[in-house]
Image (spheres, rainbow, N blue to C red):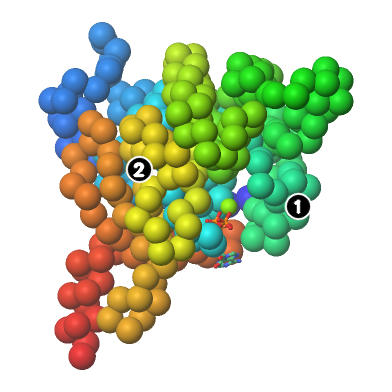
């Protein structure tokens, strides 16, 4: 299996830092802005979890801050699931197990789709580097057993943390986050916000898990999330979209927020490649300069 995003062979778990390139400038910034670091032996790899998209890691100064939560938002079909799985596959290649909480799609269907994409994750599941938890099936079993009419946040949180513990996970994906809010009525936004706050707090409290939660943006909406709190809980926000730029339809990644990283809000053109996943080609401004020079 090749490394998502680079096509390079996956590094062995024994040498987790083998293929992680972090610009020297990132260290200065992290130090300057007081990113938590070890009292001795500071290393960017300890602070940042590389995402599996090399250019994104470069932009973020090394990747996602370890132990923090990131929001990947976008309209349907923009690549949220592919980016999330790329993050987990890259983690697995570095010896960092990951849990994927499937909500919309049954796991079996997802695994079939991934195989078609060139990512056969069955060996990683067998090695306990990846664990897929089908939330709907999981909770329908609880319904049957305990006849609970409402699923309390603590059960959802407990299930996620238990799954993570099972494989000593370092990475977690909840894709998408909004339907996890069981029990509250759809319009009960305050309930949902409290639920999500409690959940992110509990996950981050473990100090073990770097998390991606995805959120679906309805077509044409300017919102980033269903309940309007997800973006505040996240340490960073990546918005994926498909845009028409100078008459061409392109995939665009917008790095909208990145706490403690030297990133000004910026857009990048990316593509999705079978077996490799998301590859950032260039910044939107470079792209515009290039295509306009051609005309
Ligand atoms: N083999 C492939 N090669 C290139 N692009 C692909 C391939 N397979 C899927 N895609 C693209 O990836 C997109 C789906 O990505 P993904 O499932 O990650 O989107 P999503 O944002 O999670 O969507 P949803 O909101 O429906 O869950 C498709 O719309 C398609 O354009
Ligand atoms: Mg998806």
Q: Say which quarter of the image contains residue 35.
A: top left
Visible in this render: residue 211?
Answer: no
| Picture layout, residue 67 above or below residue 102 | above
| Relative horizontal placement of residue 135, taking residue 37 as reference (left or right) | right
Residue 74 image offset from top left, x and y in percent: 45, 55
Question: What residue lies at 53% left-to-right and 60% top-to-bottom?
Answer: 76
Q: Secondary structure at mark 2?
A: strand
Residue ID at (47%, 34%): 189
Q: Earlier in the sequence, mark 2 or mark 1?
A: 1
Q: Is residue 191 left or right of residue 149?
A: left
Q: Residue furthest bottom?
A: 295
Number of marks present in the image shown: 2
Q: Residue at x 28, y 47 (%)?
A: 256
Q: Which mark is residue 109?
A: 1
Please provide percent x and percent y for residue 285: 20, 67
Q: Residues within 10 Å of mark 2 (few under 14, many from 20)?
A: many
Where in the figure is residue 170, as x and y percent of width and height? 53, 25
Query: As displayed, is residue 57 above or below residue 206?
Result: below
- The quadrant of the picture occupied by the C terminus is bottom left
Classify mark 2 as within 8 Å of ligand 1 or not, answering yes or no: no
Q: Residue at (28%, 17%) from the top-left corner?
A: 37
The mark found on residue 237 in the picture is: 2
């Amino acid at each position: 299996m090749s490394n998502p995003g680079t096509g390079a062979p996956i590094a062995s778990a024994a040498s987790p830092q083998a293929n992680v390139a972090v610009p020297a400038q990132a260290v200065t910034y992290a130090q300057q802005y007081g990113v938590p670091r070890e009292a001795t032996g500071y290393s960017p790899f300890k602070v940042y979890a590389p995402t599996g998209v090399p250019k994104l890691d470069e932009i973020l100064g090394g990747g996602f801050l370890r132990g923090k939560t990131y929001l990947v938002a976008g309209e349907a079909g923009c690549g949220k699931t592919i980016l999330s799985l790329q993050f987990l596959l890259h983690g697995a290649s570095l010896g960092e197990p990951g849990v994927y909480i499937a909500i919309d799609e049954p796991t079996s269907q997802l695994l079939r789709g991934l195989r078609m994409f060139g990512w056969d994750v069955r060996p990683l599941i067998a090695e306990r580097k990846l664990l897929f938890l089908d939330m709907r099936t999981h909770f329908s079993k609880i319904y049957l057993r305990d006849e609970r009419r409402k699923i309390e946040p603590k059960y959802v949180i407990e299930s996620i943390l238990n799954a993570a513990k099972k494989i000593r996970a370092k990475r977690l994906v909840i894709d998408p986050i909004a339907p996890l809010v069981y029990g509250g009525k759809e319009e009960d936004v305050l309930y949902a916000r409290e639920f999500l706050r409690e959940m992110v707090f509990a996950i981050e409290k473990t100090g073990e898990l770097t998390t991606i939660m995805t959120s679906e943006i309805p077509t044409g909406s300017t919102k980033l999330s269903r309940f309007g709190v997800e973006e505040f809980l996240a340490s960073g926000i990546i918005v994926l979209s498909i845009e028409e730029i100078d008459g061409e339809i392109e995939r665009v990644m917008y790095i909208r927020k990145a706490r403690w990283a030297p990133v000004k809000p910026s857009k990048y053109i990316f593509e999705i490649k079978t077996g490799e996943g998301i590859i950032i080609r260039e910044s939107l401004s470079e792209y515009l300069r290039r295509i306009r020079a051609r005309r």
